[in-house]
Structures are given as C-alpha cells and as structure tokens.
Image (cartoon, rainbow, N blue to C red):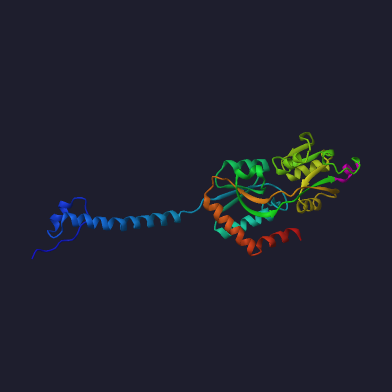
Amino acid sequence: MPRAGPIVPACNCARCHQLSSNVSPALCHRSLRLLWPAALLLATLLLAKGLHAQPLPELHAYTEEWPPYNYSERNGELKGIATEALRAACQEAGLHCKIESVPWARAYAWAQSKPNTMVYTTARKPEREQLFIWIGPLLPRSTWVFVRADALKQHGDSRDLKAYRYGVVRGEAAAQDLAAAGVPATAILSDSSNAAVLKLLQGGWVDAMVDTEIGMAWSQRNAGGLELTRLAKLSDEGAYYFALNPKSDPALADKLSAALEQLRKAGSIDEIVRRYTR
C-alpha cells in the first residue's frame, strides 16, 4: 500500500501531489483555503496586541501663573487646584505628563500648534470651541470686576463698567467679556501675567481687573493691603477645562476624561479645592 505523505501548503500543487500520491491538486487547494483564514486571524491578533502594547505619547501641559489655580512656588514646584487635578488624572490614567509654566499667550499658542499638548486653566467659550478637545469641566466659571477703592470714589461710585480702565492678562477670555460688556479697547491694558496686572492696579495704571472670587481672595491676601471693591459680575459663561490640541492622540483625551470623571466621583477634586480655599 502506498505511504501517505503530509499535506504541505504550497503554491505549486504539482510539488504537493509529488509528495503524496493520495493528495490531489484540488484537495491541496482546499487545504490552503482552510488554512489561510486561521493564519490571517492569528496575524491580525498579533498585530493588534503589538499596537496595543505601544506606549502613549507624553502629554505636555502648559499653564500660567494664576493662583490658586496654577502657580509656581519659590522653589519652582508647580502647585494649584488645576495642577493637582491634572497630576491626579495623569496618574489615574497611567500617563506621563510634563507641566510647564509660561506666559498665558505663549501657552495658548503652543497648545494650538503642537499635538499631544494642552493648556490650562482654560475658559470654554463658543469662539474657542473648535480650537481644542475639551477635557472637563474641572471647575465652574464666574468672573467679577474688581475696582480699586479710590478709583471707585473718583468716579462717584459709578456702576457703569465703561467708566474704568482695566488690566487683563494678554490673550485671556476676560478681554472678550469686557468688550462684550461695551468696554472700549482703548480702556483695556494687557500684560503677561496675573501678577503683572495686579502691579498695574496697585500702581494706579488701571482702575480695575477681572478675576474669580477665589482668585482675587488669594491675590488680596498676598498683595499687601490692596483695597478693592467687587463691582459687578462680568460673566457666568462656560466653565474651566483642560484644553487639548485637536491633533493629539485620541487615547490621551479618552483616558484623561475617564480619569477626571473617576476623580470627581470619588470626591478627590472637591478635596483639592477645599485645600486651597479653606
């Protein structure tokens, strides 16, 4: 009785038939058709596993000096409500995050031009909606006009916002809010940071500035007797977010959003806020 040879997947069925007189070319073709789907499935699974194993890119976050949301200690350590929330979210998501403090206008521009970068703490406004992927909300946003007490007296305690000169951080949303309230551009003076605007206010170069109640309370504690009056609410629009470059790896946004929501549910974000506002 002839000895049966092995079925050898090959493209030359004559060779396959030569190895075994019991295997016809048709049967050889059929065997190959049965083997190919299994081989393709195995290759797909191995490829998917290899892609999944690739580490996510580093997230580079830019922020400004705006205590108590984000600021640098004297030793250079970055602190603040939003900074701690971001670090906690990165740890929860298993991401490597590098944080750098630069002037706001620069941070805002870099986050728009470089993938896998973000800027914070950022007000989410309609005109910015398409510029970023929004991670959050982190905190509610409610801004007020704060006027130097002597400037208020000089203007007869006027509640008209157009009566005052304002200092704003260059590129921040407050300038747009003031313009929407009817304040002319000639009455708005821009500078690089919140601290610089406070100096303009203390020096009499401007009469008023815009801040949150939390932010201004922090500034007044460290401004050496600066007497201010909360004149009027300027905006309740939107909230504060982490703003991610839209060309970033989509997994960064997904992981950060999920991590931030998990921290919120666990009460961790509220605890961070309490530490800075108690």
For this rendering, which residue is in front, 13 or 228?
Answer: 13
The part of the chain drawn in magenta is 148-153
Was residue 149 drawn as part of the magenta stretch in this picture? yes
Please identify the quadrant where the C terminus is shown.
Answer: bottom right
For this rendering, which residue is in front, 40 or 210?
Answer: 40
Q: Residue at x 69, y 61 (%)?
A: 270
Was residue 243 drawn as part of the magenta stretch in this picture? no
Location of residue 230 in the rendering, given as x and y in whole percent from the top left corner: 83, 49
Q: Quadrant of residue 110?
A: top right
| Residue 141 appears anywhere in the view | yes
Q: Residue at x 63, y 45 (%)?
A: 129
Q: Residue at x 46, y 54 (%)?
A: 54
Prevailing secondary structure of the magenta residues: helix
Location of residue 57 in the rendering, given as x and y in whole percent from the top left corner: 52, 50
Describe residue 71's horizontal placement relative to residue 37 as left or right: right
How many numbered discs sit on the rendered protein? 0
Q: Quadrant of residue 263?
A: bottom right
Q: Residue at x 78, y 33 (%)?
A: 186
